[in-house]
């Protein structure tokens, strides 16, 4: 399910449920990203269609990725089809005693909460920097296929991800460094 076979320094993970309309945004973005090869997608980048396997993603993230780019539908109050770049706070997080585990609706917040719990319990290494490329959904109702505004946003989101990958390759984070807040949009991840 990935384009690279070995552990990578960078993971681009498309999450979402393709049976819930615009929730399939992240999955569609990574499907299109797989069409690109080097130099657009640098070596050391793993592209994964995670879908609804948020628990699997949280465990995979303990392998010590330098950068995680989560791609998902996120509601932040903008018009449908608006693409957001959000830098998640990667500072110390208190692990949740009971992280919300819902295999069909485990978005960025839930994955990151579970990751904090798992890393505290296992000593695993979470990503140094976490970015979320999110798109405002029009509808998360049952049904396959993206709405027109969200489908129109996919190519722009893919270009944004390619730009982020190029920037990450040009200026890799120092080992052990924690990501700061983004000037583009600094916040914790918002969920639908």
Image (spheres, rainbow, N blue to C red):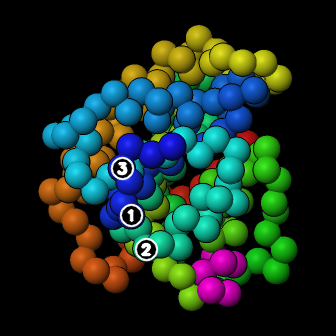
Residue at horizontal 68%, vertical 50%?
53
What residue is disc 3 on? 4
User: Would you call the spot at circle 1 few (<14 residues within 10 Å), some (14-19), or many (20 or more)?
Assistant: some
Residue 60: x and y in percent read: 55, 64
Q: Give how far across and how far down residue 133 sits, in percent.
A: 48, 43
Between tags 2 and 3, which lies in front?
3
**Residue 99: image tag:** none
Examine the image and state in which quarter residue 142 appears.
top right
Residue lying furthest front? 5
Q: Which residues are magenta?
A: 116-122
What distance separates the C-alpha of mark 2 from that of mark 3? Answer: 16 Å
Instruction: Check disc 3 and report its element: helix, strand or loop.
Output: loop
Callout 2 environment at 10 Å: few (<14), some (14 to 19), or many (20+)? Answer: some
Spatial CA distance of label 1 from label 2 is: 9 Å
The residue drawn where x is 51% and y is 62% is 88
Left or right of 63 in this view: 179: left
Q: CA distance from mark 3 to mark 1?
A: 8 Å
Residue 76 at x, y percent in the picture: 63, 41
Identify the mark nearer the N-term, 1 or 2: 1
Above or below 177: residue 32: above
Question: Is residue 138 covered in magenta?
Answer: no
For the stretch drawn in magenta, what is the main secondary structure?
helix
Residue 78 in sight in this render: no
Left or right placement of residue 97 versus residue 23 in this view: right
- Of labels 2 and 3, earlier in sequence is 3
Q: Which residue is mark 2?
A: 64
* Disc 1 + disc 2, Cβ < 8 Å: yes
Looking at the image, residue 18 lies above or below residue 90: above
Pair 1/2: label in front: 1
Residue bearing mark 1: 7
């Amino acid at each position: 399910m990935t384009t690279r076979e070995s552990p990578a320094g960078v993971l681009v993970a498309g999450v979402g449920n393709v049976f819930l309309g615009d929730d399939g945004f992240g999955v569609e973005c990574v499907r299109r990203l797989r069409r690109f090869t080097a130099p657009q997608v640098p070596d050391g980048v793993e592209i994964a269609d995670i879908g609804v396997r948020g628990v699997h993603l949280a465990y995979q993230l303990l392998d010590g990725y330098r950068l995680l780019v989560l791609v998902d539908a996120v509601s932040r109050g903008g018009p449908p089809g608006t693409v957001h770049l959000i830098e998640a706070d990667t500072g110390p997080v208190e692990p949740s005693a009971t992280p919300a585990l819902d295999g069909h609706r485990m978005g960025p917040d839930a994955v990151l909460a579970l990751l904090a719990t798992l890393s505290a319990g296992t000593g695993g290494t979470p990503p140094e920097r976490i970015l979320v490329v999110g798109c405002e959904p029009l509808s998360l109702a049952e049904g396959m296929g993206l709405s027109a505004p969200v489908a129109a946003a996919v190519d722009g989101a893919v270009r944004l991800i390619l730009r982020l990958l190029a920037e990450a390759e040009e200026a890799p984070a120092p080992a052990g460094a924690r990501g700061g807040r983004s000037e583009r949009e600094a916040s914790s991840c918002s969920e639908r």
